[in-house]
Image (cartoon, rainbow, N blue to C red):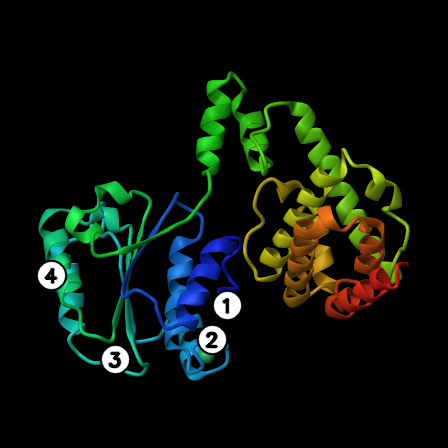
Amino acid sequence: MFESVFGHGRVKKVLGKMIERDSLSRSMAFVGPDGIGKRMMALELAQALLCATRNQCGTCLHCQKCKKNLHPDIEIIEPDGLQIKVDQVRQVAEKLHFRPFEGAVRVLIVDRADSLRDEAANAFLKSLEEPPEYVHFVLVTSDWNSLLPTIRSRCQRIAFQGLRIDDKIQILESRGIESDLATRLASISLRRLETDEEAWLLFEKHADMVLSFMERSAEEKGVPGQLANLARDKAELPGFLDVMLLVLREGARVSYKMELEPPLTGFGERIQSLCQVVDAKHWRQAWEACGSFCAKRRTNPNTALWFDFFSTNELGNLEGAKAEFKARVQRGQ
Ligand SMILES: [Zn+2]
């Protein structure tokens, strides 16, 4: 579930469990920094609630309409200009009294709920106080404290983590780093804030290695041993795996026709040509496989073996690769 949102594993788990146990709060607030996927998660949640299987099957009529943003049981209120206006709230509030058009529930998403002020906030509060049983509210905000206390007290708060890249840039600039380098460093500050140009050069080296590895794997259907030395290099390996995750994620994004983001914009052509041979599903599988390998790596030292499997299965058969990998580890090979 929630596949089009990258990251936020903890939030996905919490929401998934609530849906499974049918214990989802009717009024929730997604709170966290801007630009990290809260609104998208709200839309995904709406799809999960409306799906005929309640599991975001992706194929039922509800899921199809949700994907095209055409489901009549999802309403979105967002600022018109700087604020959400009282008329916008009233219009939607009236509709909430009608039963769902097609699904089992109606979902109202209030994006930038902190821009609800005064009259609009009070009008919204009325809807929130006595909602019909089929209505789910999801408020999306980066500023929890600016919501009316009476709105806050009626919402279950779901916290999203993440430092905005702008914040990172600002911090770096405040340390005297010039703007262009600060932007580049912020975009590669995955585990910590990078403050040295050396970190950028190392990132470029790793991105080149990851792409070469993938290009050769795709060309020759597997290049075992290519990353054996790196797999043994305890100092360099974590950084390399971070970059590998980033490349796989960007590959998935590009194959979904999304725009390439920094820091990999300089590698656009190579990622594009890999997209000719690797489709979105396999980029995604590869990204997830790499993520779960990284999470378990401490208890599993067979990095070289994992690289080999990744390579020989040309990003196309990772399930098979994982099973084979597991079997070999169990046999002690
Ligand atoms: Zn469905």
Report, in whole angstroms, how far the alpha carbon at label 3 lies from the one at label 1: 23 Å
Q: Residues within 10 Å of mark 1 (few under 14, many from 20)?
A: some
| Contact flag, marks 2 and 1 (Cβ < 8 Å) | yes
Mark 3 crowd level (few <14, some 14–19, many ≥20, 10 Å Cα) = some
Under circle 4, the secondary element is helix
Is residue 220 visible in the rendered image? The answer is yes
Residue matched to label 3: 100
Q: Which residue is mark 4?
A: 126
Q: Nearer the viewer, mark 3 or mark 1?
A: 1
In the rendered image, the vertical position of residue 122 relative to residue 312, given as above or below: above
Q: Name which residue type carries label 2.
A: Asn
Q: Amino acid at mark 4?
A: Lys
Tag 1 or tag 2, which sits nearer the N-term? 1
Mark toward the start of the polypeptide (1 vs 4): 1
Other residues around mark 2 within 10 Å, as few (<14) / some (14–19) / many (≥20) = some
Q: Alpha carbon of mark 2 to alpha carbon of mark 3: how far?
A: 19 Å
